[in-house]
Amino acid sequence: DTAVSQTPKYLVTQMGNDKSIKCEQNLGHDTMYWYKQDSKKFLKIMFSYNNKELIINETVPNRFSPKSPDKAHLNLHINSLELGDSAVYFCASSRGPSGSDTQYFGPGTRLTVL
Amino acid sequence: TQLLEQSPQFLSIQEGENLTVYCNSSSVFSSLQWYRQEPGEGPVLLVTVVTGGEVKKLKRLTFQFGDARKDSSLHITAAQTGDTGLYLCAGLNAGNMLTFGGGTRLMVKP
């Protein structure tokens, strides 16, 4: 059973389009995250939600809007895609919002903006 | 901004060799984590070190947290091809967020 799953695995789109990435976890965790990994492999946190409430928003452009319909899902919608948005986006979850709680990562979504 | 620098960025060795990778910062972290990431997958936590000077072993992998909690090292003894991957360190800051380093890409050749 996949603990943290993301769809789609690959996403290729044109500049200016709007796209969504979905994330689901079946671990019963309260906290979920979105990270962006750039071409140099730096992994940076974008958002964190705990019990469907936003707790971390790391200076991400307004074009990125996370939505958590329930504790098991955290989706990421991106408006007006730009070339610089090309990256691998990882969803993760943890038991709670403490940084010492182990984070479990999904397989990633590779977004390519042309 | 707290930065974690990992070195080397790339390392290619033969099976059976030993290696050490480093994770350095000018900032103090309350704990430090090491992850391994394989192509097409997300990072997987290997270990968390919390106390300055702490040493943890995971089979052939030895992790050490610096006394001042600003740096860490990962030593692999008798590397195997299965050790190939991207090794990431991540420090937990006072704001309860993880800051990741840029990773060391290790290739172990048979």
Image (cartoon, coloured by chain):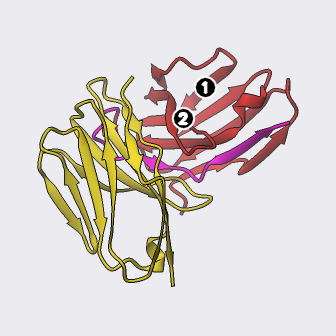
Chain colours: A red, B yellow
- Up the image or down, B47 lies above or below B26; here it is below
* Image quarter of the N terminus of chain B: top left
Chain of the residue on which disc 2 is drawn:
A
Q: Residue at x 54, y 32 (%)?
A: A70
Q: Quadrant of residue A99?
A: top left
Quick check: A61 left or right of A98?
Answer: right
Across and down, in percent, residue B35 comes to 40, 54
- Examine the residues drawn in magenta and state their main secondary structure: loop
The answer to whether one can see residue B43 in this image is: yes
Across and down, in percent, residue A56 comes to 44, 22
- The numbered disc on residue A66 is 1
Q: Amino acid at mark 2?
A: Trp
- Residue placed most toward the observer, B45 or A77: B45
The answer to whether one can see residue A71 in this image is: no
- Residue placed most toward the observer, A46 or A41: A41
Give the foreground label among 1 and 2. 2
Q: Residue furthest top?
A: A62
Q: Residue at x 28, y 31 (%)?
A: B26
Q: Residue at x 50, y 34 (%)?
A: A44
The residue range painted magenta reads A97-114
Q: Residue at x 23, y 38 (%)?
A: B70
Q: Quadrant of residue B40?
A: bottom right
Q: Are marks 1 and 2 in contact (CB under 8 Å)?
A: yes
Q: Within 10 angstroms of label 1, few (less than 14), some, or many (20 or more) residues? A: many
Residue bearing mark 2: A34
User: Spatial distance from mark 1 to mark 2, Cα to Cα?
Assistant: 9 Å
- The numbered disc on residue B84 is none
Across and down, in percent, residue B92 comes to 30, 35
Quick check: B8 left or right of A7?
Answer: left
The numbered mark, 1 or 2, whose residue comes first in the sequence reads 2
